[in-house]
Image (cartoon, rainbow, N blue to C red):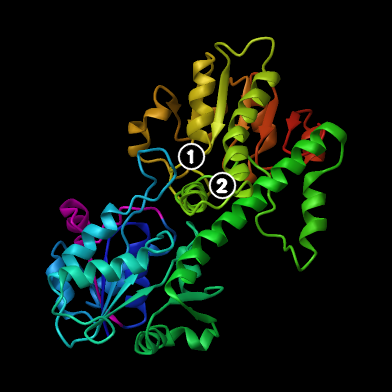
Amino acid sequence: MKIAVIGAGYVGLVTAACFSEFGYEVICIDNNKYKIKQLKKKIIPIYEPGLSDLVKKNAKSKYLLFSNSISKIKDANIIFIAVGTPSTRRGDGEADLKFVFSVVKDISKFLIKRKKQLVITKSTVPVGTGKKIQDMMCELRPDLINNKDYFIASNPEFLREGSAIEDFMRPDRVVCGVTDKQAEEILKELYRPLNLREAPVLFADLESAEIIKYASNAFLALKVSFINEIANLCEKTGGNVQMIAKGMGLDNRIGPKFLHPGPGFGGSCFPKDTRALYASFKKNKINNTLVKSVINFNEDRKISIVNKIKNLLKPKIKNKVIAFLGVTFKPNTDDLRESPSLEIIPRLRKLGAKIHAHDPAFNPEFIKVKELDKIKWHSNVLEAIKNADLLVIHTEWNEYRGLDLLKVKKALKNPIILDLRNIFNLDDMKRYNIKYHGIGFKS
């Protein structure tokens, strides 16, 4: 089986590397010449544990190839569209599908009559996109007959950054949207290597598959926002949000995952997908307040964190030094997209605070991010902490969990810690006489 993956971004590269690990011949195509040149040299453009080794191994064995030429899809039985679908610049939250439709237009030129190639959207797309692709293909290639010469399918990704390889190889489920029994059989064969791991493969119609992705991410975002609201209640009235989350999570109907309070959700999926889902409700004239409230609460959450920091540094925050540990939206990734830090840090700087930052995934691209302008970067954690008026834990990197608290106390100008991820223990802080403030309990 020969596979073409169009898009060498996060989803496309992980998809291509993992399918090549199954022994399939995979070609990953991208119009970014520099990126493909780097990948041919086995230089990986993204930080993802295990991905570099997988790419190097399968590129060496020739199971995984890279190209800038879309014409290479002619050899493929299966063609994945894995390009970005960012929010539109209009600000209405809708997903911008220009890259998807541009790829469809390019693909149409090289589909081969009677080869029965399967074109699959791996990108996260709004409901109805698969049908639009079908309509486009009919217009662009009237000589081809849908469900006879080619097939259209949806196969949304559910990859967590930092755990993408594990998620692909041992998925909770594989969702496939199809319009034809033959397309279903092709997808069953494609995912046959997962049979030994008993990964459930769910077949649905195109529209259901598209909605499943958005609904899943919006529901998880809802859990994050809900536990943050409970944390607010705990800080006012008493109680410990971590114990509450544990008590809730022991209920099998709820489960413990994503019940972790913090500065709000970020990344490439949750913010974008909740906005896009809400846009779908609006577009179809369906009243929705639940998803909208999640979006609003998450925006307000970052402002409330800034206010929390202001209160800890009163009477004035101006010229105070804040050690800010972790700027990525989660550990084990260098992804800054919609990280809460990109809202919190600029607001703190506008108030006159000085930011000294550290992140284990730091790379030179961080300096180019306008929201992180004029902050001082440190390669050593203790150097970032030295003489700070406040230490803020923003991202729960393992490197921070094992910090020597005695050294931390000595390095700080004032022994105050705001732990936005609750990675430390309150009793330990009392032992070292550190003023400790977490999320969701009275300090």
Disc 1, SS: loop
Amino acid at dot 1: Asp
138 lies left or right of 173: left
Question: Within the image, what quadrant is residue 132 found in?
Answer: bottom left
Residue 60 vs residue 267, the one in the foreground: 267
Residue 6's place in the image compared with 411, above or below, is below
Span highlighted in magenta in the image: 24-47
Spatial separation of the CA atoms under disc 1 and disc 2: 8 Å
Numbered label attached to residue 8: none
Amino acid at dot 2: Trp
Residue 394 position, x and y percent, is: 58, 38
Residue 438 position, x and y percent, is: 72, 36
Residue 277's place in the image compared with 329, above or below, is below
Q: Residue reaching furthest right?
A: 238
Q: Quadrant of the N terminus?
A: bottom left
39 lies left or right of 424: left
At 60% from the left edge and 49% from the top edge, which residue is drawn? 288
Residue 413 position, x and y percent, is: 64, 18
Residue 210 vs residue 376, the one in the foreground: 210
Disc 2, SS: loop
Q: Quadrant of the C terminus?
A: top right
Q: Where does label 1 land, which residue?
A: 359
Q: Where does label 2 land, which residue?
A: 397
362 lies left or right of 410: left
The verdict on residue 63 being magenta is no
The verdict on residue 32 being magenta is yes
At 64% from the left edge and 51% from the top edge, which residue is drawn? 222
Residue 379 position, x and y percent, is: 44, 35
Mark 1 and mark 2 in contact? Answer it, CB < 8 Å. Answer: yes
